[in-house]
Amino acid sequence: MVHIEDLRAAFVARLKKALEAKEIPQWGAGARLAKMANVTPKAASKWMNGESIPGAAKMLALANALDVKVEWLQHGSGPGPGESAKENQQPSPAAQTIPSPQSLMPCDFTDDLEGQYTFIDQYDARAAAGTGFDNVHVVLRNTLAFKTEWLRAKGVKAKNLKVIYAHGDSMWPTINHHDVLLVDESRIEPSDGQIFVMGNLEGSIVKRLIASSDGGWIISSDNPDKAKYPNRELSDEEINEHRILGRVIWRGGDL
């Protein structure tokens, strides 16, 4: 997962730093960039405003014209203008926004990242990795960007996906408090060993379902403290009391 706004903001910060190092004022910089990369002033203006990121060929042209390494301008990797390799051993805050470029950015950029990324609605809703969380009001906060190719490989459709947050530590170490959860709302059939967001009288919970030997289901917490988070065994009929809201297909958070 990656915030598209963070990708763009980090690139703009590096671009402005490179312009400053070349003593090119920001006023009129768009026209200068347009000539460097042989694009329209409108396209260059979008780069400066963080509305898009140059493709591979344009990125290389800009890097050559600004006398910076293309990997630095593109990813924040290596020394920037006026920096030595030693000084750059600790990445800048802007570079830290983006994990390893190989994991996020394809070798062949397109000028419009929306074609490579799918934006999933991010909701101010929480599923309790504990006893239950009552989401009285659910508000759309923003979107998170996922690589379209990755979603396709997972066999999921964007229209069925939502991003919510975990609350509590009952699913630790798999899911931590405040982790981001990507939920597929089309997957509502119980499946052995999978993690689901479920709704019951206590609110929304996130738990692992385990098929029991008698044909029923075990609602299980991954936290090994079973005194605090005991398993709950249900018959195949009783599982219907817990409405499955969707299956968790990805989590994101601190290591």
Image (cartoon, rainbow, N blue to C red):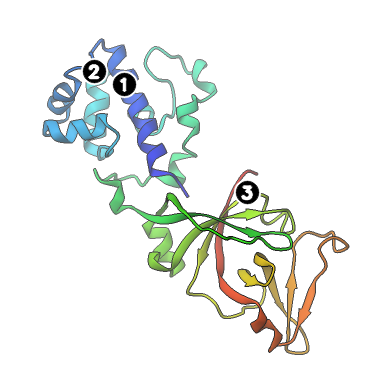
Q: Is residue 108 left or right of residue 4?
A: left
Dot 2 and dot 1 residues touching (CB under 8 Å):
yes
Kind of residue at disc 2: Gln
Q: Earlier in the sequence, mark 3 or mark 2?
A: 2
10 Å crowding of disc 1: few (<14), some (14-19), many (20+): some
Q: Position of residue 170 (x, y in %)?
A: 74, 58
Viewer-nearest of labels 1 and 3? 3
Kind of residue at disc 3: His
Dividing the picture into quarters, in which one does residue 101 lie? top left
* Residue occupied by mark 3: 178
For the question of whether residue 202 can be seen, the reply is yes
- Residue at the top extreme of this rendering: 23
Q: Tell me which residue sits at (42%, 49%) in the image.
A: 142
10 Å crowding of disc 3: few (<14), some (14-19), many (20+): some
Dividing the picture into quarters, in which one does residue 78 lie? top left
Q: Position of residue 31 (x, y in %)?
A: 13, 24
Q: Earlier in the sequence, mark 1 or mark 3?
A: 1
Viewer-nearest of labels 3 and 2? 3
Q: Earlier in the sequence, mark 2 or mark 1?
A: 1
In-front residue for pair 238/187: 238
* Residue occupied by mark 1: 16
Q: Is residue 251 left or right of residue 228?
A: left
Residue 26 — which label?
Answer: 2
For the question of whether residue 194 can be seen, the reply is no
